[in-house]
Image: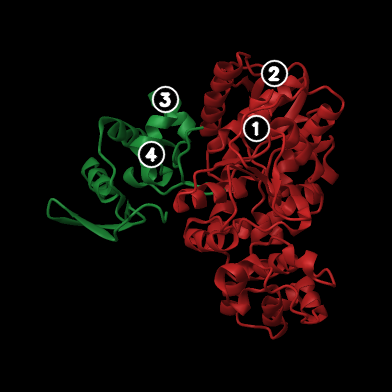
Amino acid sequence: MSDVDKAPYALFVAYACTRCRNCIEMCPSYIATGEFANTPMGRLQLVRRRATPDELYRSFSLCAMCKRCAYFCPLGLDVAEATRQIRGVLTAAGRPVSYVAKVVDNFLRHGNNVGMPPKVVAMAARALAKKIIQEKGAEPRLYLFDGERYVEALSGAEERPRGIVALLFPSSSDLFEFEEAFRGYVYLLNLLGYDVVLSLRVTDTANYGYYLGAEHMRKIAGMYLEEIRRVGPHIVVFGECGHGWHVFTRLVAPESPRPAVHIHQLLFRAYSRGELKIRRVEARRPVVYMDPCNYSRGASPIVTEPRALLKAAVGEYVELWKNPRESLCCLGGGGLIAPEAMELAVKYWEKMYRGVEFGTAVRPCATCKAQLRRVFHALGVQADVAGVVDLLYRAT
Amino acid sequence: MTDVRCPNAVVLAGRRIELQNCVPKNKEEWSLELAKLLAEINGIKFTDTVRRVVEYVRNFWQQYEVCPPASVIESDLGVDKKTLLEAFGGSYGAICALAGVEPPTGCLSQVLSST
């Protein structure tokens, strides 16, 4: 039995493909590289002819897993899923995508992609809690849980949350780099009446196991579930992260003993009921909204909520595609946010986004924000990069 | 770290130091002198602020095996984001490179922001 036989969905779509070529020019991987082997159809042909592991690696490691092919395919064949399975086969054969493997290793050891041990997570949370006081004048109700005890984030004193508890899974990037988003999560949840708990053992929204293989994906999903069970919150709140949300809604939320929601869903509900007042804020114009792939094409769409919240905060904004499901990937998915893929990203952005004027580029996903920030920096584009929650933080 | 210039090797005081992504292959070979040289190669002026940040990051990494978030540098050293950004030419990757440590992984831009 060849290894490809362990990728049943990949084989199925490889034989189901009618080679209509609808998936070629719309594929970000093809746009970036110009190679047929890096198209959904090209990838399926590799599977069908049982290509060597080297060939499979070269092609499938460059798939951004954005699901744009699934939207454009007349049969709805999803090559992101094929990529997931083929990568699983490659990982089992000792050929994992190296950056993805590094990130997964960090998650398994420290509970976050960045590789921050619990003490560093606590330091970052404390630094950001201090900023909330400076900026909002209110002391945040943020508690850090190390698996056994709770400490209050600012003082470090042992203290359990007393109110209604929201267990927050922020993106570790929001804690590390896009910190206004993190301050937004905490501040807004506090405003809605929740005490926020941050786990020092699982401090992320991501699940790079999705990019590596099913075994790791399930293991990481299990870590989320274990933490939910340990904390036993009233609600589980998931931060801005595309692929993570896609996996979370399939593997974690259905098993969660407590309601598990995306932060946009929660804020939108509160806003619609008049419980969250959003005032207009200044943002560099034009404000451009772009759907993260796994929000508009993932398992559980997050499409209307961010738009309504954004509109409340900034007023008019620009859409780039007539249909959210057509949104074009940032080329950071699938692990392509790796530093070594930076040049490819710059080339791609130059090609695909030339002529688009950005004042504030809004893309509420950690990968997207990182990609935009580094590409804009490299190209000298003077634009702000934001999610939705960081804008709401300024607007409340 | 494509935004940081990292030679494969440098010669310091007559000694050749092999580097990978600015990190000495032999960890013992990191020194402030090496940081100064890498700063020069990257057009970063080795000011007091830069030296303080580099020493802090180096120590932090020795203790926790990860580069610190900018917010922690800001909070511990009292260096605000704007100063940090200007000192390192907007590159977070340069902070790690000068300190001789691998940049952190995940969905990060390796770019410094003032917000």
Q: Secondary structure at mark 2?
A: loop
| Quadrant assignment for the N terminus of chain A | bottom right
Precedes in sequence: disc 1 or disc 2: 2
Task: Work out whether B100 lies above or below A53.
Answer: above
Q: Mark 3 vs mark 4: tell me if same chain.
A: yes
Q: Mark 3 vs mark 2: tell me if same chain.
A: no
Precedes in sequence: disc 3 or disc 4: 4
Colour scheme shown: by chain
Task: Identify the chain of the residue marked 3, using the numbered disc in the image.
Answer: B
Q: Amino acid at mark 4?
A: Gln
Q: Amino acid at mark 3?
A: Asp
Q: Residue furthest left?
A: B14
Task: Identify the chain of the residue marked 1, using the numbered disc in the image.
Answer: A
- Mark 3 neighbour class, 10 Å CA radius: few under 14, some 14 to 19, many 20 or more: few
- Report the residue marked by disc 3: B76
- Report the residue marked by disc 4: B62
